[in-house]
Image: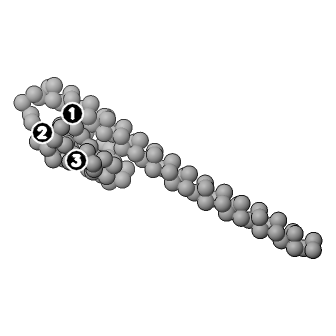
Amino acid sequence: MKRGSAKTAFLTIAAFLVLFLVLVFFQFRSLKKKVTLLSCDAIKQELSDSLSKFRAEHPEKKFPPGTIIDLEKVYKDGYIKHYQHCPQGGTYIINRYGEIYCTFHNSNLGE
Ligand SMILES: [Zn+2]
């Protein structure tokens, strides 16, 4: 009788432990997703600011919808401080409203 309840207690603890680990795992995944989205957004914001600056300096330059942002060129020309790209490998493209979007994180903005 006593052995049985010890086993039940052990199984209960084991079940809680597994549940806890599963929760931690999903929390971590969700957090990681948020952080990468945040950094992609931060890069996109910096690129948008640079684009505004570039447009002010070169009003004759036009960016048709679908223009891919050449991150290396933008960096070499000093428009962004760090050579960085979307953590998920997305490409930054200008949409028909003249806004920059990421093909991985905001593909809906490319319509
Ligand atoms: Zn992205």
Q: Is residue 58 left or right of residue 73?
A: left
Q: As displayed, is residue 14 above or below residue 4?
A: above
Q: Amino acid at mark 2?
A: Phe
Q: CA distance from mark 3 to mark 2?
A: 14 Å
Q: Amino acid at mark 3?
A: Gly
Which quadrant of the structure image shows residue 64?
top left
Which quadrant of the structure image shows residue 48?
top left
Residue 78 can be seen in this image: no
Marks 1 & 2, CB-CB < 8 Å contact: yes
Q: CA distance from mark 3 to mark 1?
A: 17 Å
Disc 3 marks which residue? 110
Residue beneath the point at 31% across and 47% down: 106
Disc 1 marks which residue? 51
Q: Is residue 31 left or right of residue 45?
A: right
Q: As displayed, is residue 61 above or below residue 11?
A: above
Q: CA distance from mark 1 to mark 2?
A: 10 Å
- Residue 13 picture location, percent across and down: 77, 62
Observer-nearest residue: 80 or 24? 24
Q: Secondary structure at mark 1?
A: helix
Disc 2 marks which residue? 63
